[in-house]
């Protein structure tokens, strides 16, 4: 699968390399059928517009997932990740990783519509994060310390 990560927000530094590596590793493990995955990192302002447009919901959300057949897209609010990281005493990198895994699980057919499904999905997120993200993120963050990309 070809994975492209575009950082369209400027407020918070993000390692697009770490996000891309995580997405590749998890999508391979999930055996996703998509040929291409686009991950777009946006601000809350942009996310609020997208959430209103596609879900008729006011305000920003953490992630929107779209499946177009051979192409899939994850739209992620970095501002939400930063806010949630503060709330849960985590890091923005850990929250972004959680959002990526969450979106990929949706692409694999997982649902979080009911409380039982949410519990099952959260457990799967923790498993994938434990197995994949720690080494991917730590390696990429060491290599790219201070090297964040905006495009």
Image (cartoon, grey):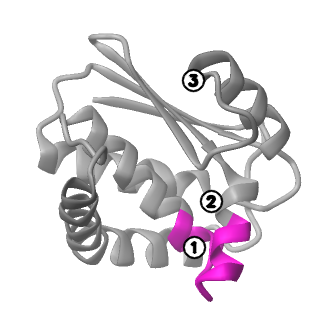
In the rendered structure, which segment of residues is drawn in magenta? 82-95
Quarter of the image for residue 67 reads: top left
Quarter of the image for residue 144 reads: bottom right
Disc 2 marks which residue? 15
**Circle 2: element type:** loop
Mark 1 and mark 2 residues within 8 Å of each other at the beta carbon? yes
Quarter of the image for residue 49 reads: top right
Q: How far, Cα to Cα, is label 2 from label 3?
A: 28 Å
Can you tell which mark lies on residue 55?
3
Q: Main secondary structure of the magenta part?
A: helix
Which quadrant would the C terminus be assigned to in this image?
A: top right
Residue, far top = 69
Q: How far, Cα to Cα, is label 1 from label 3?
A: 34 Å
**Residue 15 in the figure: left or right of residue 39:** right
**Residue 132 in the figure: left or right of residue 40:** left
In the rendered view, tell whether residue 87 sits above or below residue 137: below
At label 2, counting other C-alpha atoms closer than 10 Å, the crowd grade (few under 14, some 14-19, many 20 or more) is many
**Residue 22 percent across, percent down from the top left:** 37, 56
**Residue 91 in the figure: left or right of residue 43:** left
Can you tell which mark lies on residue 141?
1
Q: How many marks?
A: 3
Say which label, 1 or 3, has the lower sequence index. 3
Q: Residue at x 27, y 59 (%)?
A: 115
Residue, far bottom = 89
Q: Residue at x 81, y 60 (%)?
A: 12
**Circle 3: element type:** helix
Say which label, 2 or 3, has the lower sequence index. 2
């Amino acid at each position: 699968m070809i994975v492209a990560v575009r950082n369209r927000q400027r407020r918070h530094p993000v390692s697009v390399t770490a996000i891309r590596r995580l997405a590749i590793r998890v999508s391979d493990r999930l055996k996703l059928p998509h040929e291409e995955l686009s991950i777009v990192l946006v601000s809350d302002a942009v996310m609020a517009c997208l959430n209103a447009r596609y879900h008729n919901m006011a305000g920003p959300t953490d992630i929107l997932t779209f499946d177009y057949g051979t192409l899939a897209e994850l739209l992620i609010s970095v501002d939400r990740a930063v806010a949630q990281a503060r709330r849960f005493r985590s890091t923005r990198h850990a929250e972004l990783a959680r959002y990526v895994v969450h979106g990929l699980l949706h692409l694999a057919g997982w649902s979080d519509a009911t409380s039982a499904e949410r519990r099952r999905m959260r457990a799967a997120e923790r498993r994938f994060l434990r197995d994949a993200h720690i080494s991917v993120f730590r390696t990429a963050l060491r290599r790219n310390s201070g090297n964040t990309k905006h495009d």
